[in-house]
Amino acid sequence: MQINDPVLLAEVTHAFHAYETALMADDIPAMDALFHDAPTTNRYGVGEVLYGIEEIREFRKGRGGSPQRKLGRVAITVYGDSFATADAEFFREGSDRRGRQTQSWVKFPEGLFGGWKVVSAHVSLEGTTS
């Protein structure tokens, strides 16, 4: 198995940064396009547990945008030709507390950025229990 094929790594990296741009702009259609449209797509957030794309969509509509943040260290790894992970540290405006985000990406036959879509995501803040 090849790890970090340069072409695939560039695709996932581009998709990751497109998602971050959409998140900061509260561009719900763009975020939605980068998550796999399935009941098996899940997202755990700082204060929410969302099972399936419909719960994720409802959460995004009701939250009124993500807190603004700056990325710290980002580590993206592609395994083979259809699976990748993206791990990122972030810092919300006005806070020194580090946040962490992990995304699992799968390459599908259709879609932007070579078909890469998030199938699982987890967001947390250091020092929180919820």
Image (cartoon, grey):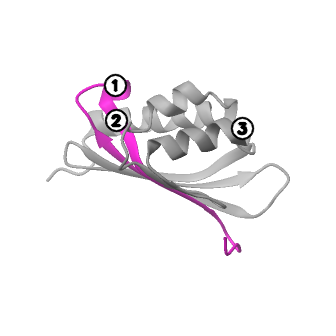
**Residue furthest out toward the right:** 94
Span highlighted in magenta in the image: 103-130
Question: Where in the figure is residue 61, as x and y percent of width and height?
Answer: 65, 35
Residue closer to the observer: 92 or 27:
27
Q: Which numbered disc, 3 or 2, marks the residue that appears first in the sequence?
A: 3
Q: CA distance from mark 3 to mark 2?
A: 23 Å
- Is residue 102 visible in this depiction of the protein? no
Callout in the foreground (3, 2): 3
Q: Are marks 2 and 1 in contact (CB under 8 Å)?
A: yes
Q: CA distance from mark 2 to mark 1?
A: 7 Å
The dot on residue 65 is 3
- Quadrant into which the C terminus falls: bottom right
Q: Amino acid at mark 2?
A: Trp
Q: Amino acid at mark 3?
A: Gly
Using the rendered view, name the quadrant where residue 59 is placed. top right
Q: Amino acid at mark 1?
A: Gly
| Residue at figure coordinates x 17%, y 50% from the top left | 2
Q: Are marks 1 and 3 in contact (CB under 8 Å)?
A: no
Question: Where in the figure is residue 102, as x and y percent of width and height?
Answer: 48, 56
Q: Is residue 1 left or right of residue 107?
A: left
Question: Where in the figure is residue 19, as x and y percent of width and height?
Answer: 53, 35
| Residue at figure coordinates x 36%, y 41% from the top left | 38
The dot on residue 111 is 1
Q: Which residue is mark 2?
A: 116
